[in-house]
Image (cartoon, helix red, strand yellow):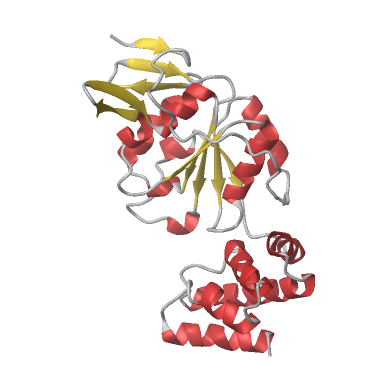
């Protein structure tokens, strides 16, 4: 028989990946009003979807908000093989007994943590369905294997990220799922702000950071020529970190910026030309 369980019952034998709020503020530069909107969503117990391209700062934003709100953070990377049991938990055999092991989602619900599911569109639809009861007024999680229903502790918030570039006929979120989230749109920052981020994150000289961002904008224009993924701010930071530690500008761009983007010889050649024009 189902029963309503709170954080004091069904305590698992060990934790489910909870991370305490970082003691130091994760660096994040707001682009618009996303910080205040997220705070209001948290206050009003609303689930949030962060929508934007890979490497534009969605994960860092969640880390920053966990610090700002002083909530534990659970991050789950979604993939095709992620099952409901991976999220909720399972029974394990320990020596001479069977114990229940909370999954990361259940651990977050019990602890009142922010639970962040990265790239939710990669998860199977039958896995995503288990989130529905946590995104409305119920704020509960059903554990079918134990017959319990866990009430979310105060402070719990569900956050997912979604890359519209991954949309496919058979790989997209159902409207019934999308409409359960307040959606915040993310994109790559304006050039001056992106250069500041690259400078702050890597320690590279401001002029070099601006040059890398200028190159990135030229490379992003190649998306119409077959570039599946444009260079992200994350790639620019990685490139800048190599440069800061003595790797030449061209070589750093080749291994950290161009090579991860494409294996097509013609496309790589065109991108290499842009690097040589930017850093003669």
Whether 163 is drawn above or below 202: the answer is above
Q: The C terminus lies in which quarter of the figure?
A: bottom right
Residue 15: x and y in percent read: 44, 29
Asked if residue 198 lies left or right of residue 102, the reply is right
Q: Residue at x 61, y 43 (%)?
A: 63
Q: Residue at x 66, y 31 (%)?
A: 70
Res. 88 image quadrant: top left
**Which of the pair 126/265 is nearer the observer?**
265
Q: Residue at x 49, y 54 (%)?
A: 164
Can residue 136 be seen from the camera position used here?
A: no
Whether 200 is drawn above or below 48: the answer is below
Whether 242 is drawn above or below 124: the answer is below
**Which of the pair 278/167 is nearer the observer?**
278
Can residue 85 be seen from the camera position used here?
A: yes
Asked if residue 169 lies left or right of residue 65, the reply is left
Residue 142: x and y in percent read: 36, 21
**Which of the pair 91/164 is nearer the observer?**
91
């Amino acid at each position: 028989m189902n029963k309503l369980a709170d954080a004091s019952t069904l305590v698992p034998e060990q934790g489910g990946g909870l991370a305490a709020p970082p003691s130091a503020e994760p660096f994040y530069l707001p682009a618009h009003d996303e910080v205040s909107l997220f705070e209001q969503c948290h206050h009003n117990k609303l689930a949030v979807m962060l929508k934007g391209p890979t490497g534009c700062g969605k994960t860092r934003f969640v880390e920053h908000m966990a610090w700002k709100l002083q909530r534990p953070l659970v991050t789950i990377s979604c993939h095709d093989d992620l099952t409901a049991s991976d999220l909720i938990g399972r029974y394990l055999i320990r020596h001479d007994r069977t114990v229940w092991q909370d999954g990361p989602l259940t651990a977050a619900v019990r602890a009142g943590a922010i639970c962040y599911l990265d790239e939710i569109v990669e998860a199977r639809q039958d896995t995503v369905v288990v989130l529905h009861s946590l995104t409305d007024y119920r704020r509960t999680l059903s554990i079918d294997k134990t017959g319990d229903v866990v009430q979310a502790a105060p402070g719990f918030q569900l956050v997912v990220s979604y890359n519209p570039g991954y949309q496919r006929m058979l790989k997209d979120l159902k409207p019934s799922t999308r409409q359960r989230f307040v959606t915040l749109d993310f994109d790559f920052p304006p050039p001056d702000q992106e250069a500041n981020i690259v400078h702050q994150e890597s320690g590279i000289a401001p002029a070099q950071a601006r040059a890398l961002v200028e190159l990135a904008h030229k490379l992003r224009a190649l998306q119409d020529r077959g570039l599946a993924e444009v260079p992200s701010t994350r790639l620019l930071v990685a490139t800048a970190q190599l440069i800061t530690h003595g790797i030449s500008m061209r070589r750093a761009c080749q291994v950290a910026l161009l090579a991860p983007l494409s294996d097509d010889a013609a496309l790589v050649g065109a991108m290499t030309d842009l690097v040589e024009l930017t850093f003669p």
